[in-house]
Image (cartoon, rainbow, N blue to C red):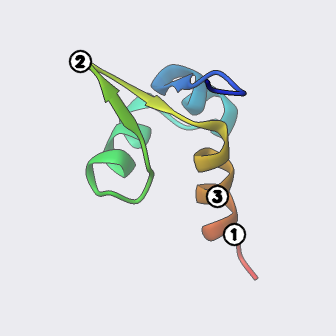
Amino acid sequence: MLSKPLLTVHEAAQLLKVKEATIRQWIRDQQMRAIKFGREWRIAEADLERFVNDHANR
């Protein structure tokens, strides 16, 4: 079972302060890992954190 709930595109966009279309584009470009349930995408918190860390300036 999942230890943490999956985030919607809307919730991920709110957390990153970007538009939902940006999240969908990152998913489509396979930059962000996501799971599709029917017509909706879900993002694990760990995958969102990994995405942010991978794109941070060093």
Residue 50 disc label: 3
Q: Mark 1 or 2 closer to N-term? A: 2
Q: Looking at numbered disc 1 in the image, what kind of residue is underneath it?
A: Ala
Q: CA distance from mark 2 to mark 3?
A: 24 Å
Give x and y (percent) for residue 45: 66, 38
Give x and y (percent) for residue 2: 63, 26
Give x and y (percent) for residue 40: 32, 19
For the N terminus, the quadrant is top right
- Residue that numbered label 1 is attached to: 56
Q: Is residue 37 left or right of residue 18?
A: left
Q: 47 or 9, which lies in front?
A: 47
Residue 44 disc label: none
Q: 4 or 9, which lies in front?
A: 4
Q: Looking at numbered disc 3 in the image, what kind of residue is underneath it?
A: Arg
- Residue that numbered label 2 is attached to: 39
Marks 1 & 3, CB-CB < 8 Å contact: no
Q: Nearer the viewer, mark 1 or mark 2?
A: 2
Q: Secondary structure at mark 3?
A: helix
For the C terminus, the quadrant is bottom right
Badge 2: residue crowd in 10 Å (few <14, some 14–19, many ≥20):
few
Q: Looking at numbered disc 2 in the image, what kind of residue is underneath it?
A: Arg
